[in-house]
């Protein structure tokens, strides 16, 4: 399961991930992180059995946590099943099934490459 | 040789007994029945393609206003349409961006809005005369308000299209979609086995006046498209049809990120089984149709081909590029191409779509030459400075600072012992180093990901590189990557100032 962390100003300098790992002993994988002086946006892959514990640990530290259950929102009326999103996705979220584009939930890291790559403007990120 | 006449086939279509298959079913049928058997058993093979067709647009007649206006410039939802045709005829091109929303809304979007019944805002500026006194006008129109809305597309339905990849070190945003750096992916376009012109590459049936499926309407082939190049297997069609009869499912506006608007169109051609030559050509498979994979990392007209690849390989989802498995996906929709071929098949079966005798075949000779350029723009070598000072990476920061002060550039290319470019150092890097007070050798502070240009490249490319990366100078290198000069934004602005 992927979790998106929104780190607010004020706590962004704290070693949040390190302390949560030490506390929960969860083997997390950082899939994407964009951190600047005032805030941060991080996507973590967390083993299913640790999700609840990790979420709570972050929330106690003041981090807003959003589980990424739906990868991207697709407007079915705009999508023409071209496949421009398929080969540009770094995690292979999209694939063809009998030439229709299907998305595997759980792979998306909310990077947005497909959103601008879609000629029909049919894709939106969940959290934007 | 087994043969059938077109009137025989049309008779069967009229009485509902025509046997129709799609071009996807045909290869196996011909394998099983042979070409003679296929001509006996099949009457019509339907083809279809659905993809970006930039070279498209629509002639619109607005009717005359009172007092009358001779429109010189016109905007439809802030998208400029060409007004230099009589008084109230306009041509709206699919790729024209809008004045207010830029490339996110363009001519293609106006076409789609009209087709789905939306009202559009028209703003016209006239050139007044005794016949046409009106200066300017504004009005709101729907598709039914135009006298004619005739789609005329100069170049559609490419027989096949070059696949695209990118060897450069940055993501390229192209009309072939997002191309990731370092041969990161491959994009392709075209329906392969279903492509209309790949099923009749010798123009045995397709010609001037051939009735086609154009975005849901019955349209016609006007003739060969622009850049028609049958000798090399890149034939194209110029087509026409009535926008008022088109269907939004097969006409979709698109925007390619950082490139521009385009129009996705569905085009299908039913091919009659007149003879065994047509049975043979419609038995074409994805594995028979090959295209070069071109390197869009090279921003020149003649892009090098990385390798040849068949549509079968492209459709498999990965191809091998220099020993690396690279993910590939289409920009055109094969699902929609099937939808075109299937819809057309049903229309023929229901007797709604008759086949037509061409007035003449498409030309077997084409022309897709490069532009004749009579005013060559200068190359980097004509503009650059040759008195560039290069340094080795082990010199102290103070020495680099002195060289910058005494020289004419704010940049020092850093080279290896054999003169190859390995980095660059700027006055800013030195200031930063001095401010933080740490490093002593420039190797610690230089930029290693350095951009460069070649002597024989046009200055437009150098300008674009400077702009893309927000930098002000580029080392000029030779084929061995040795530094031979420097080109700066000052060189380019001086050139412009002189030209104006």
Image (spheres, coloured by chain):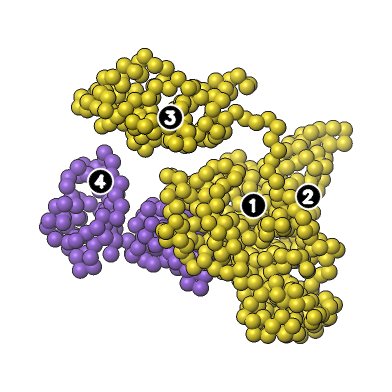
Q: Which residue is mark 1?
A: B54
Look at mark 2 in the image and give the residue it sits on: B61
Residue B481: give x, y in percent of width and height: 43, 35
Is label 3 in contact with label 1 (beta carbons under 8 Å)?
no
Residue located 20% across and 55% down the image: A59
Residue in the picture at 83% in, 76% down? B6
State left or right for residue A8 relative to residue B386. Answer: left
- In the shown orientation, is residue B177 left or right of residue B428? right
Q: Is residue B160 above or below residue B428?
A: below
Callouts 3 and 4 in the same chain = no
Contact? badges 1 and 2 (CB < 8 Å): no
Q: CA distance from mark 4 to mark 1?
A: 45 Å
Picture layout, residue B369 above or below residue B479: below
Chain name for mark 1 = B
Q: Which of the two discs, 3 and 1, sits closer to the camera?
A: 3
**Image vertical order of residue B358 relative to residue B432, above or below:** below
> Which residue is the extreme one toward the right?
B130
Q: Colour of chain B?
A: yellow
User: Under tag 2, what secondary structure?
Assistant: strand
- Say which residue appears at 26% left-offset and 55% top-offset: A30
- Labels 3, 2: front one: 3
- SS at circle 3: strand
Residue A8, numbered label: 4
Circle on res. B483: 3
Q: Residue B294 at what x, y percent from top left? A: 54, 52
Marks 3/2 same chain: yes
Q: Are dots 2 and 4 on a single chain? A: no
Q: If the image is split into quadrants, where does the N terminus of chain B sit?
A: bottom right
Same subunit: marks 4 and 1: no
Cα distance between the residues tagged 3 and 1? 41 Å
As drawn, the chain in purple is A
């Amino acid at each position: 399961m992927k979790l998106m962390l929104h780190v607010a100003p004020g706590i962004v300098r704290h070693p949040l991930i390190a302390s949560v790992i030490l506390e929960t002993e969860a083997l997390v994988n950082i899939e994407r992180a964009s951190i600047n002086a005032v805030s941060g946006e991080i996507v973590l892959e967390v083993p299913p059995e640790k999700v609840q514990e990790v979420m709570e640990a972050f929330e106690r530290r003041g981090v807003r946590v959003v589980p990424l259950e739906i990868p991207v929102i697709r407007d079915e009326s705009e999508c023409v099943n071209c496949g421009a999103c398929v080969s540009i996705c770094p995690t292979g979220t999209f694939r063809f099934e009998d030439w229709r584009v299907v998305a595997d939930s759980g792979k998306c890291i909310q990077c947005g490459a497909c959103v601008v790559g879609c000629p029909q403007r049919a894709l939106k990120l969940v959290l934007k | 040789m087994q043969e059938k006449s077109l009137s025989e086939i049309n008779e069967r279509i009229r009485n509902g007994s025509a046997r129709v298959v799609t071009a996807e079913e045909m290869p196996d049928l011909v394998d099983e029945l042979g070409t003679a058997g296929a001509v006996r058993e099949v009457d019509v093979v339907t083809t279809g393609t659905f993809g970006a067709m930039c070279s498209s647009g629509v002639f619109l007649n607005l009717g005359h206003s009172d007092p009358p206006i001779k429109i010189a410039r016109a905007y439809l939802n802030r998208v400029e349409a060409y007004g230099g045709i009589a008084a109230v005829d306009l041509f709206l091109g699919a790729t024209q961006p809008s004045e207010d929303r830029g490339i996110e809304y363009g001519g293609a979007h106006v076409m789609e809005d009209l087709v789905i019944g939306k009202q559009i805002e028209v703003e016209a500026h006239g050139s007044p005369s005794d016949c046409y006194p009106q200066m300017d006008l504004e009005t709101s129109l729907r598709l039914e308000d135009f006298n004619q809305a005739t789609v005329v597309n100069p170049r559609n339905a490419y027989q096949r299209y070059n696949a695209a990849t990118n060897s450069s070190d940055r993501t390229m945003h192209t009309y072939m979609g997002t191309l990731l750096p370092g041969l990161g992916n491959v994009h392709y376009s075209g329906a392969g086995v279903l492509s209309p012109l790949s099923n009749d590459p010798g123009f045995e049936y397709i010609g001037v006046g051939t009735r086609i499926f154009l975005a849901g309407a019955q349209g016609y082939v006007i003739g060969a498209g622009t850049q028609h190049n049958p000798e090399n297997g890149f034939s194209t069609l110029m087509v026409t049809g009535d926008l008022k009869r088109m269907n939004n499912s097969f006409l979709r506006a698109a925007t390619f990120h950082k490139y521009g608007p385009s129009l996705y169109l569905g085009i299908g051609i039913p091919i009659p089984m007149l003879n065994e030559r047509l049975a043979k050509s419609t038995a074409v498979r994805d594995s028979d149709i090959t295209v070069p994979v071109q390197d869009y990392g090279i921003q020149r007209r003649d892009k090098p081909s990385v390798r040849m690849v068949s549509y079968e390989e492209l459709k498999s989802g990965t191809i091998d590029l220099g020993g690396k498995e690279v993910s590939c996906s289409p920009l055109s929709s094969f699902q929609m191409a099937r939808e075109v071929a299937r819809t057309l098949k049903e229309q023929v079966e229901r007797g709604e779509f008759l086949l037509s005798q061409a007035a003449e075949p498409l030309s077997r000779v084409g022309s897709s030459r490069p532009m004749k350029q009579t005013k060559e723009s200068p190359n980097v070598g004509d503009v650059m400075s040759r008195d560039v000072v290069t340094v080795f990476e082990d010199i102290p920061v103070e020495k680099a600072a002195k060289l910058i002060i005494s020289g004419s550039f704010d940049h020092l290319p850093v080279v290896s012992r054999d003169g190859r470019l390995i980095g660059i150092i700027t006055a800013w890097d030195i200031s930063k180093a001095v401010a933080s007070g740490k490093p002593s050798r420039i190797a610690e502070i230089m930029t290693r990901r350095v951009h460069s240009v070649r002597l024989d490249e046009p200055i437009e490319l150098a300008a674009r590189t400077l702009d893309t990366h927000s930098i002000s100078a580029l080392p000029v290198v030779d084929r061995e990557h040795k530094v031979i000069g420097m080109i700066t934004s000052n060189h380019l602005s001086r050139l412009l100032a002189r030209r104006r």
